[in-house]
Image (cartoon, rainbow, N blue to C red):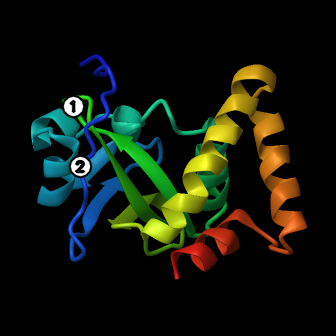
Amino acid sequence: MSKPMPTQHERVMKDDDFIVSKTDLNGHITYCNEIFMQMANMSEEQLLGKPHSIVRHPDMPKAVFKLLWDYVKSGKEIFAYVKNLSADGGYYWVYANVTPSYDHSGNIIGYYSVRIKPSQKALDIIKPLYEKMLSIENSQGVDASIDYLTNLLKEKGVSSYDEFIIQIQD
């Protein structure tokens, strides 16, 4: 299944919606709830076994996903704002919490994510930040985008991306 051409059609989550998914260690979807299927405009059959990046919107900086994977692979949870792509080319924003899943021996066996509707206040901050990061990535690479974000957070007196994201959602 090839990625659709993005459109300007926005899908908006309801205030009480929860998107839930689980992935294996490689990010392939092993579970998705009905709201995820509705927002992605895909069936369970189209999602299960596919990389979670099947819903990655091209407007998203790769640096955000690098940070996300660095956190969860090291056993930490992370909060992030993500713009996702629907099968019809539309998009939807989420406020995501991603956590590792463990077996009884304490080994990471996959990842669990719950997404809710992001606050408008947060999106007003995130959208221009992600546009700037994506511009830097396109001209200088992912590491330069991460450096930009790191320096911005230091200027704001915030110790991590995760802390920043939690602060602006409130």
Visible in this render: residue 51? no
Describe residue 102's horizontal placement relative to residue 5 as left or right: right
Tell me what residue is drawn at x 32 percent, y 21 percent. 3
- Where residue 29 sits in the image (x, y, percent)? 30, 45
Q: Nearer the viewer, residue 11 or 30?
A: 11
Query: Are dots 2 and 1 in contact, CB under 8 Å?
Result: no
Q: Nearer the viewer, residue 33 or 31?
A: 33
Tell me what residue is drawn at x 53 percent, y 39 percent. 60
Residue at the far bottom in the pictured view: 170
Residue, disc 2: 11
Q: Quadrant of the N terminus?
A: top left
- Nearer-N-terminus badge (2/1): 2
Visible in this render: residue 122? yes
Q: At label 1, which amino acid type do we have?
A: Ala
Q: CA distance from mark 2 to mark 1?
A: 12 Å
Q: At label 2, which amino acid type do we have?
A: Arg
Describe residue 162's horizontal placement relative to residue 140 as left or right: left
Per the rendering, the mark at residue 87 is 1
- Where residue 134 sits in the image (x, y, percent)? 65, 34
Please tell me in which quadrant of the rendered image residue 32 appears: bottom left
